[in-house]
């Protein structure tokens, strides 16, 4: 079968022409502060869901478009509103599920923003604003690609499409698994596109083929029944801060690599990435050395890391000459793809118990797991996606590992084991998702939208 070049070309043209309207719609979404965290206004998340639902409705291709939520298991709460739209496949064509999320991270310190976070602003070829990249641009890549595809081929196409735009990804996707099982029939697909990741750089597309997992927990370290004067007993009894500092230091070797037995590494080649690029992208000053060993990307993609992300101890203003009885820390371990988060946690817990100094009493609570992910790159959907990315960007895509986690992917794999999962995205290394001055590279967005429209075209022409 030879591809229908004229149809492909007309989809590509329509996709290029669809970019300005998609960016205008993106700007309108960015103006809605849809933060799903506790303490923020949930009505804004609903307003954002309604805006996305209206965009989906406006495509005129779905059998149903709904705003739905699901129960949060183990509580009497419900999750944040998601948009679910679907259209059945016909004539033996596949169904594609397009995922993104319409909620955003809180803004952090507003004084660090160079333009107001909820005021979409273009400077230097980038669109600035909270959610401009993560992940309202993912939402608009889907909507824009569907709009362009429909414009080019008409609304009477055979491809099945499910659109699932979540409303609580940044807040931990607490009702996600329940939502999948409640709506399994509407969501079931041959190919799932998760548009919530990044690209190699602002010219080179990527397919994300591995993600690290995450094991996060709160550790209490207690050495004394109560606080006492450091002049009375200091030097004879251990305080909790001393035990904490001593214990935590055992987690890393002298190079800063993780020194916990039982945490695995994945053995896989990584592309060239220089220390100078690392310094530039991570903001690492010249006088500070990188940590770990092996290629830089293997440290980020394929090996575990451990970070102390919070500590409760007396603050500097409250410092007095007192032996602290207990310290609490939050430990976040990134887990190499291929190892489950619960196995990794068991290794870290065993390490901490074995190294607790002076018999310090340890407690573990609020343990939270997100499993990593490895794509089977031999599937036909991966090959088709690579062709579409090449067509949209004009450059061969790179297989990307990601040091972060998208824990809900494990839920997708569990609920839909037969689906092929493609992790794509609209971000580039300078997008600063989750940080002040988050932005979208406009050329990347255009290329991503065109690529996705081409993917729809290819799948619509393919028998399963
Ligand atoms: Zn995201």
Image (cartoon, rainbow, N blue to C red):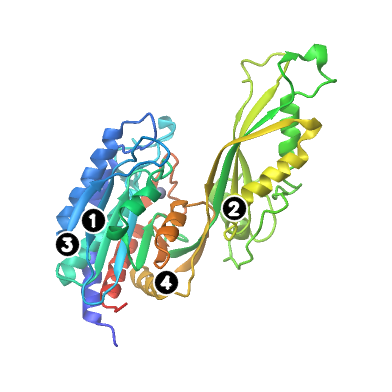
From the image, tell me which residue sits under label 4.
382
Q: Is residue 452 above or below residue 463?
A: above
**Dot in front, 3 or 1:** 1
From the image, tell me which residue sits under label 3.
61
User: Residues under labels 3 and 4: Cα distance?
Assistant: 25 Å
User: Residue placed at 57% from the left, 46% from the top?
Assistant: 215
Q: Is residue 377 above or below residue 447?
A: below
User: Residue placed at 29% from the left, 72% from the top?
Assistant: 94
Report x, y in % for residue 280: 55, 50
In the picture, measured across the screen, residue 393 lies left or right of residue 321, that is left
Q: Is mark 4 within 8 Å of ligand 1?
A: no
In the picture, measured across the screen, residue 316 lies left or right of residue 46, that is right
Q: Is mark 2 within 8 Å of ligand 1?
A: no
Report the quarter where the C terminus lies. bottom left
Is residue 18 visible in the rendered structure shown here?
no
**Looking at the image, is mark 2 or mark 1 earlier in the sequence?**
1
Q: Is mark 1 within 8 Å of ligand 1?
A: no
For mark 2, does the 10 Å Cα neighbourhood hold few (<14), some (14 to 19), or many (20 or more) residues? many
C-beta proximity under 8 Å, tags 2 and 1? no
**Looking at the image, is mark 3 or mark 1 earlier in the sequence?**
3
Report x, y in % for residue 124: 36, 49
User: Residues under labels 3 and 1: Cα distance?
Assistant: 9 Å
Disc number placed over residue 335 in the picture, else none? 2
User: Which of the 4 image quarters holds residue 307?
Assistant: top right
Disc number placed over residue 201 in the picture, else none? none
């Amino acid at each position: 079968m030879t591809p229908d070049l004229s149809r492909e070309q007309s989809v590509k043209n329509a996709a290029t022409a669809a970019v300005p309207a998609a960016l205008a719609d993106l700007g309108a979404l960015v103006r809605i502060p849809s933060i799903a965290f506790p303490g923020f206004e949930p009505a804004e998340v609903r307003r954002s869901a309604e805006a996305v639902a209206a965009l989906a409705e406006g495509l005129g291709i779905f059998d149903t478009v709904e705003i739905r939520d699901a129960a949060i298991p183990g509580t009497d709460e419900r999750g944040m509103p998601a948009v679910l739209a679907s259209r059945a496949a016909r004539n033996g064509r596949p169904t594609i599920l397009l995922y993104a999320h319409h909620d955003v991270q809180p803004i952090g310190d507003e004084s660090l923003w160079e333009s107001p976070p909820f005021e979409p602003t273009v400077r230097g070829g980038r669109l600035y604003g909270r959610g401009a990249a993560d992940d309202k641009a993912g939402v608009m890549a889907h909507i824009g690609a569907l709009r362009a595809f429909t414009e080019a081929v008409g609304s009477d196409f055979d491809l099945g499409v499910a659109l699932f735009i979540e409303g609580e990804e940044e807040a931990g996707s607490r009702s996600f698994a329940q939502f999948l099982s409640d709506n399994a029939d509407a969501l079931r697909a041959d190919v799932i596109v998760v548009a919530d990741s990044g690209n190699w750089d602002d010219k080179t597309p990527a397919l994300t083929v591995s993600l690290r997992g995450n094991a996060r927990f709160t550790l209490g370290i207690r050495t004394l029944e109560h606080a006492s004067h450091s002049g009375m007993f200091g030097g004879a009894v251990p305080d909790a801060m001393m035990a904490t500092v001593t214990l935590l230091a055992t987690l890393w070797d002298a190079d800063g690599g993780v020194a916990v037995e039982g945490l695995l590494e994945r053995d896989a080649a990584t592309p060239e990435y220089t220390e100078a690029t690392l310094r530039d992208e991570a903001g690492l000053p010249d006088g500070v050395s990188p940590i770990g060993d092996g290629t830089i990307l293997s440290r980020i993609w394929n090996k575990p890391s451990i970070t102390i992300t919070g500590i409760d101890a007396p603050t500097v203003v409250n410092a007095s000459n007192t032996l602290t009885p207990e310290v609490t820390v939050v430990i976040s371990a990134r887990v190499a793809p291929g190892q489950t988060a619960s196995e990794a946690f068991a290794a870290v817990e065993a390490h901490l118990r074995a190294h607790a100094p002076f018999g310090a009493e340890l407690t573990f609570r609020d343990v939270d797991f997100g499993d990593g992910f490895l794509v089977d790159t031999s599937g036909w959907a991966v090959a088709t996606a690579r062709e579409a990315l090449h067509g949209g960007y004009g450059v061969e895509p790179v297989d990307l590992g990601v040091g972060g986690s998208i824990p809900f992917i494990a839920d997708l794999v569990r609920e839909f084991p037969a689906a092929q999962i493609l992790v794509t995205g609209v971000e580039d290394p300078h997008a600063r998702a989750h940080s002040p001055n988050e932005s979208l590279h406009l050329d990347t967005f255009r290329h991503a939208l065109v690529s996705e429209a081409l993917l729809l075209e290819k799948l619509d022409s393919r028998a399963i």
